[in-house]
Image: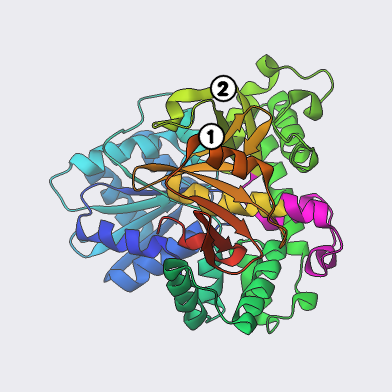
Amino acid sequence: MYRKINEELVKWKENYKMPLMLVGARQTGKTYILEEFCKKNFENYIYMNIDKEEDICEIFEKTIDPDKIIEKIEIIKNVTIIPENTIIFLDEIQVSERAISSLKYFCESNKPYKIVCAGSLLGVKINRFKSSFPVGKVTIKYLYPMDFEEYLIALNETKLIEEIKKHYQNNKAVLTPIHEKALDLYKKYLVLGGMPALINNFILNNCNISHVNFELQELIITSYLADMNKYTENSEGIKNSQIYNSIPKELARVNNTFKYSIVDKDARKIRYESSLDWLLASNMILKCDLTEKNESPLKAFVNSNKFKLYLSDTGLLRALSNLDYNEILLDKNEMYKGVLTENYIACELYPKYKELYYYNFAKYEIDFLIKIDGDIIPIEVKSGRRTNSKSLNEYIKKYNPKYSIRISSKNFGFENNIKSVPLYAVFCINN
């Protein structure tokens, strides 16, 4: 399946002096993407899993000199490595801090070594690196679950994508049958989420949502919870899982600003802050900060004590909430559909901006603030067709933004300086 990250990998290939590190949560497709990239773009390709191949791991424990590492790999693998036409993929590199340290010396080598690497919880490893992380010596790219556009590409809906993009630009409504088709695909994505295994299973079952193996989502969640205990001390693992499991309840609250007391009635920031940092670094959750001024840079005005948390995948949120998929597809649970919708918007925006903000003023709240072409643009999110909003109207009256964006089930349009964006067109924002 096509992933947008492929274009960034091709750019790296053109100037591969620095090793490339692909960071992302488990099951987002890191290994598959890098393997396909290596096979298609290089004459020779060597794959090594440092977690499973103890002899390879031992090489890095003995030396971090690139020439000696290559020499030992050639002996163990019985291969000849020609730097000019060979790429080496080090998977599960987080297992060996020495292997990560060696990337600096591969970068500085006068030989054209080509190294790519990935690993589960690599973001956590980077944040907690005990020695000196090779800053400036590694190209770091982030992989997230498949966004809605990638999902449409996987379904071979390229003509629909072009139609959506065209109407996003001209603000004119698409034909009703096309609008309804796109909304139907959106609802299914809300249930499936962007994990490649789910989308692939959906396709293999002729896009029949009732035949999808939703146990795959349960398995992914189980693997996430297992990682929390495998790669942390026992007490921290418990706190990690407590925060992760509390997110559906947090988001269902009217005021869904994160509260430690929802995690545990006796919870305090000082006890849970490191666990929260671990989950954020793992890319399992996303953070949306309250900014106290709608001015640039938004980050400068963040209230560090007030924020919202979202799961990195809306399908996993549905599964973790134990919500039957028909409740969403048949509009039987409007309240929680709104929760999934807000989480979906966060997942679509975060990969582009790498940060999320919301804004409060008086008694009103704006769901998201983003910067487009230097202007701060407010975004209001509605899960259905009802778009009356006191908050956005008051924001416009008070601050007079260049324009505003309202995301809902309604068709494209532009009225009263509000750009109407259908839920299925969020991928177009700031493209």
Tell me if residue 110 is in the magenta stretch: no
How far apart are the alpha carbons under marks 1 and 2? Answer: 25 Å
Q: Position of residue 241 (x, y in %)?
A: 74, 36
First to last magenta residue range: 311-339
From the viewer's perspective, is residue 269 above or below residue 68? above
Q: Assign a secondary structure to mark 2.
A: strand
Q: Residues within 10 Å of mark 2 (few under 14, many from 20)?
A: few
Quadrant position of the C terminus in the picture? bottom left
What residue is shown at x 71% (from left), y 43% (from top)? 226
Can residue 282 be seen from the camera position used here? no
Closest to the observer: 51 or 223? 223
Q: Are marks 1 and 2 in contact (CB under 8 Å)?
A: no
Q: Which mark is residue 304?
A: 2
Q: Please tell me whether residue 182 is drawn above or below residue 364 in the rendered image.
A: below
Residue that carries the numbered disc 1 in the rendered image = 398
User: Is 283 placed left or right of 126 in the picture?
Assistant: right
Q: Quadrant of residue 8?
A: bottom left
Work out whether mark 1 precedes mark 2 in sequence or the reverse, and give the earlier one.
2
- Name the secondary structure under disc 1: helix
Residue 105 or residue 392, whichever sits in front:
392
Q: What's under tag 1, amino acid-wise?
A: Lys
| Residue at x-position 50% and y-position 75% | 153
Task: Point out which mark residue 218 bears.
Answer: none
